[in-house]
Amino acid sequence: MIKYNWVCNQCSNVNQAGTDICTTCGCSAYAPPDEIDARKDPSGYELRSFRALLDKKVIAFCYTPVFIVVFAFNGNLLALMLVVLSIASLVITEFDFVKFIFKDKWAKKSFAGYSVSMLLLFLVRVTATNEVIVNTVIALILVYLLAMSYYLFKSQASEEFLSRYYKHHKENVN
Ligand SMILES: [Zn+2]
């Protein structure tokens, strides 16, 4: 029991001493911030949790860019093979997500543009013998990876894509 008057974190109602449940909204005085968040804005909270889950998935596949960077620097075909393998494992483990990417216009266009540009850069990197060209391609690959990660994690378009994927995910679960 709380021995003083307290303000509810959820609805801001002032509650009398001697109770730990808000008389207006029923929220506990000890409710963790997460729970308050969930009660205040249930769909927003679900979307944020979902995004966190998805970000973890994406981060799990961050070794793809790592191999791309290794390949950019040493031009080693083994690194390129690891790029292909990590993408293949992404397709297998996240098949539902990959399928959605191909159904979504924005994602499909972005993915196609990214793959084609990267492939071209890879081709030039493998075949180039001129040092200036090699260094230019390395710089381009790095800039491209950075721009892409910004595009994927921070842009308005990626937020909208996430909402669409979330909706699709919910419809398929229920
Ligand atoms: Zn309350």
Image: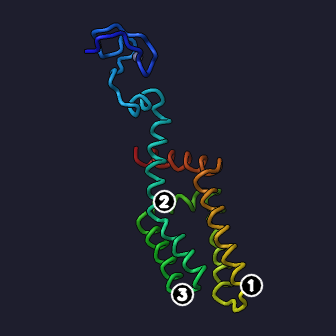
Q: Secondary structure at mark 3?
A: helix
Indicate which quadrant contains ligand 1.
top left
- Calculate the distance from the C-alpha at mark 1 to the C-alpha at mark 2: 33 Å
Q: N-terminal of the two: label 1 or label 2? A: 2
Badge 1 amino acid: Val
**Residue name at image x 36 percent, y 20 percent:** 27
Q: Which quarter of the figure is the N terminus placed in?
A: top left
**Residue name at image x 42 percent, y 10 percent:** 14
Q: Quick check: marks 1 and 3 in contact, CB under 8 Å?
A: no
Q: Which mark is residue 29?
A: none
Q: Secondary structure at mark 2?
A: helix
Q: Which mark is residue 58?
A: 2
Q: Which mark is residue 132?
A: 1
Badge 2 amino acid: Val
Badge 3 amino acid: Leu
Q: N-terminal of the two: label 1 or label 3? A: 3
The residue pinned by badge 3 equals 77
The residue furthest bottom is 129
Q: Tell me which corner region of the image, top left, top right, bottom left or bottom right, holds residue 152.
A: bottom right
Pointer 1 local density, CA inside 10 Å: few below 14, some 14–19, many at least 20: few
**Residue name at image x 50 percent, y 47 percent:** 166
The residue furthest front is 4
- Calculate the distance from the C-alpha at mark 2 to the C-alpha at mark 3: 24 Å
Q: Which is nearer the eye, 13 or 169?
A: 13
**Residue name at image x 51 percent, y 78 percent:** 84
Q: Which quarter of the figure is the C terminus placed in?
A: top left
Task: Give how far across and how far down residue 106 sits, in percent.
Answer: 65, 56
Q: Give the vertical position of 173 relative to 66 (above or below).
A: above
Task: Give how far across and how far down residue 21 sits, in percent.
Answer: 31, 16
Q: Give the vertical position of 92 relative to 47 (above or below).
A: below
Q: Which is nearer the eye, 136 or 95?
A: 136
Task: Give how far across and how far down residue 164 sits, in percent.
Answer: 56, 47
